[in-house]
Amino acid sequence: MGQYFDRMCLNNRGKLRICTHSMKITTASFDFRIRAKEPLILPSYKGSTLRGGFGYAFRRIVCAIKDRECHDCLLGEKCVYSYVFETPPRHDTKIMRKYKAAPHPFLIEPPADRRRGYKTGDELLFRFILIGRAIDYLPYFVYAFDELGRIGIGKGKTTYELLSVSCDGTIIYDSESKTLKPFTSSTLLSIPFPSLQGQAIWKDNAGTDRTKQSSDLTAGQSEAVELGLFRSLKLSFLSPTRIIYNGHLTLDLEFHIFMRNLLRRLALLSYFHCGEDPSAWDFRGLIEQAEKVRVKEHGLMWYDWERYSGRQDTRMKMGGFVGKITFEGDITPFMPFIRAGEVVHVGKGTSFGLGKYEIA
């Protein structure tokens, strides 16, 4: 994948800097609040149940030819369900020609707690993140989750009521009006970044600068920003993270392995969903730089998790690592990408909420 990342150059001091091109990923995050209409039992990790129920309800309300599979459907390339859930690469794609599916343009962040039982009237909150042109389909998604409440989820197909949907703390949909108000998406501009300060440029559609400033960082990180360097980075993986290297899931996470997976995901999201062409980017320069960063402290552990696939009628192992890890080295050139990854996650199974991490 060496031909797919922004060109990297060395300045007269031998430091890595960005020369040309930019990466743009537009996202919008929504908080869905639902209320159980009867006793509700859910698995401890709820991402699979929410994602599976959403897919079932979504296909039920938008699919025009229900007796055909998406890959064999006349409407496949124009169907919103196919785009969101199957996500086939376009026939004229420049990348991923050998793959059957591109990364999905959405992800669900389930509640962090492991609570399983909910009484009638109990509420549950989860986050729904859309990427690129999928944001335009929000009305379909709200209706799908509303319909899922009538169909039922979890053990016994328990029904619920969709009470509200919020964006940046503002309610844009409620169960009484059943209308959708305007909202603002955010654009992550990961590169170029100012003066190699390790700041992700973040502006919403109104042009408001939401760049991560020194005040958002720890004392050690703030000092690093003042010096123009990040020499240490601690990441906390909050949901099972499935990162593949050399064809296998890995627990022995090196920085370059993490960055390979993250850069690939960001590039593909940018290309397939945000209209950006990463063909001029140079992965090799970034990865060579990433290989110089070392693991300082390793506190990751494996978390086993299974989900049931209704489509395949089987249980599937979806385990991944959780915990904390600290890297040491020249982290600065990678900070914008890592900041973006806090929003869009990393690794496999992100639509279930897997691969969620934050800078600790």
Image (cartoon, rainbow, N blue to C red):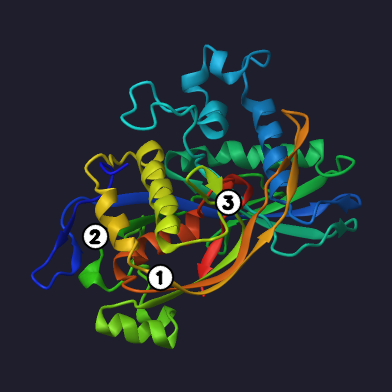
Instruction: Say the numbered circle drawn on residue 294.
Output: 1
**Mark 3 highlights which residue?**
242
| Coordinates of residue 43 in the picture (x, y in percent) | 80, 52
Helix, strand or loop at label 3? It is loop
| Coordinates of residue 229 in the picture (x, y in percent) | 29, 78
Residue 134 seen from this side: yes
| Coordinates of residue 261 in the picture (x, y in percent) | 44, 51
Residue 180 seen from this side: no
Q: How many marks?
A: 3
Query: Residue drawn 43% across and 47% down?
Result: 265
Quarter of the figure with residue 278: top left
**Mark 2 highlights which residue?**
192
User: Which amino acid type is shown beneath numbered disc 2?
Assistant: Pro
Lower sequence index among marks 1 and 3: 3
The reply, left or right, for residue 358 in relation to residue 5 is right
User: Which amino acid type is shown beneath numbered disc 3?
Assistant: Arg
Helix, strand or loop at label 2? It is loop
User: Which amino acid type is shown beneath numbered disc 1?
Assistant: Arg
Lower sequence index among marks 3 and 2: 2
Q: Quadrant of the N terminus?
A: top left
